[in-house]
Image: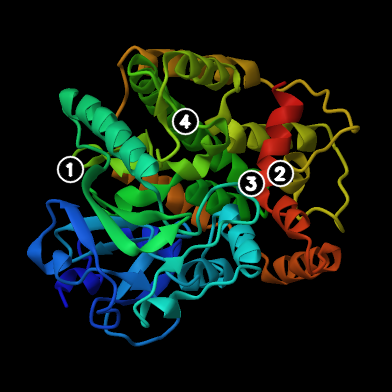
Amino acid sequence: MGDLLQIQQEGSPLYEFFKAQRVEIPLVTWEDHPFIEAKIDGDLPADLKEDLPIFATYRQFTGANALNSGGRGIVISDGERHYRIKAADLEGALTNQVARSDNNRVADVRLAAKHISKLFLLPETLELGGVYELPRYPHLDLKPFSFFGQEAVDNERHASQVIGDAFEKKGFFRPYTFVADVSYPKIQFQGEQMHSLVFELPTIESDLRFAELFNWAFLHLKYSSPAQIDEIKDPLAKFLTDITGWHGLVSKIMAANNLAPEWSSHQNQNFVLCAVDEENLGLSRVDHTSTVVDKSKALQHLHKVKSNGNEFLLLYDVLVQSQQLAKNNHKYDSQRYSSMFDAAYKWQNPEPFNIQIDGFFETQKEVQRVFTEGFHGKVRPIPVSEVLDLVSMISKIEIDQKWETKRQEKAKQFMTKDSGLRDFMLDTMTLQSRMMKSRFP
């Protein structure tokens, strides 16, 4: 068993924050599954190759561990080499453990766990020399549980190559590098053998999803005071504006190469804050298994991206809106909302939101300008120190655990055994979507 399966990370300032958003997952390897053949198409280091197949397990203290990457992938590191394995969940152990964890910041994982609880998973057939026929996700037609078909592999290989080449050409680290396709002849879906994907990362925390930062920040900001908002407002605006410039760059790379992902995959959990050099971060789109090469579809996707509003600016928008509500002596329902920020964030129709905010539209225009600059190739690398300063400021806002417990109890009252949609709607990701639709039609 190689050192890559003993998460080791030292000297990285951002690592502790990254780890706090993740779940430590025990792993099993070929020693536990010698009956699963794994064919490798790519160049993997010998110590990783000899451990394949690598899957999550419910068992604790296996001697091997990783951090989750979303709900069906893992990241591993020995402190110098960093890999992401996408599709590492043979029996639902990964998805379920992440969904149950307080560290999980990605809404889709909880929804997926609710769905897979209804699946009939029988990986034991592999031990008997048979074929393990994967079920499909109940809510996704023709999508297998956890693993990928050849078309998805080819999509991801091509898109990651194109984006990586473009970053490298500009003098940046590749956000992630496709290094191997691992196929399993006896793990199949509708007669097709299934695959895992292996990527190399410039740093392990280059897998930090924007959704994780967003939802972590929201949990703190919903308990913010006016003085704390004053301190955070400008650094937050600067960070989110810089992020939007990188979004412009990636949008141009994709459009110029006719890359068209499914619009349903355009979510902030599919954008990572990645190392672009030794001291700075940028933003990249990842998860391209649905991304095809189609000029017409790529132009349609770009049009939607450009007309979708300043999507990375939402936390700042709510911050300044809550400030203005306070200046207007707005009274919010303290039984329903934890703060003025919380009230502004969850503002819903048919309640009117007709308030004038000093500098609001100027900031919107600035973000659009920076997106356009990024689209034409000009971006600002974001110092890790600036991100850590922002994290430190937001961390000072204490979360009211009693309120959170009360909110969770209320949420449970709305849930029924089969109400996965209700559960999902209670998550901040859906609230974000609702805000976007109501304010930026």
Task: Give the CA distance from mark 3 to mark 4.
Answer: 20 Å
| Viewport quadrant of the C terminus | top right
- The residue located at (31%, 85%) in the rendering is 62
Which residue type does callout 3 highlight?
A: Met
Q: Mark 3 to mark 2: distance in Å?
A: 5 Å
Query: Tag 2 or tag 1, which sits nearer the N-term?
Result: 1
The CA distance from mark 4 to mark 1 is 30 Å
Name the mark on residue 431.
Answer: 2
**Three-letter code for the amino acid on which mark 4 is drawn:** Pro
Numbered badge on residue 261: 4
The amino acid on which the numbered mark 2 sits, given as a three-letter code, is Leu
Q: Position of residue 83 (x, y in %)?
A: 24, 56
The x, y position of residue 413, in whole percent, is 85, 68
Residue type (three-letter) at the residue carrying disc 1:
Glu
Please tell me whether mark 4 sits on a helix, a strand or a loop: loop
Res 375 quadrant in image: top left
Mark nearer the N terminus (4 vs 2): 4
Front position among marks 4 and 2: 4
Q: Assess disc 4: are there few (<14), some (14-19) or many (≥20) residues with their C-alpha within 10 Å of its C-alpha.
A: many
Question: CB atoms at circles 4 and 1 under 8 Å apart?
Answer: no
Residue 399 vs residue 251, the one in the foreground:
251
* Mark 3 vs 4, N-terminal side: 4
Image quadrant where one finds the N terminus: bottom left
Residue ID for mark 1:
278
Q: Is residue 99 above or below residue 127?
A: above
Q: Crowding at label 3, few (<14), some or many (≥20) Cα neighbours within 10 Å? A: many
Q: For the residue carrying disc 2, how many other residues have a C-alpha within 10 Å: few (<14), some (14-19), or many (20+)?
A: some
Q: Secondary structure at mark 1?
A: loop
Q: Which residue is mark 3?
A: 429
On residue 309, the disc is: none
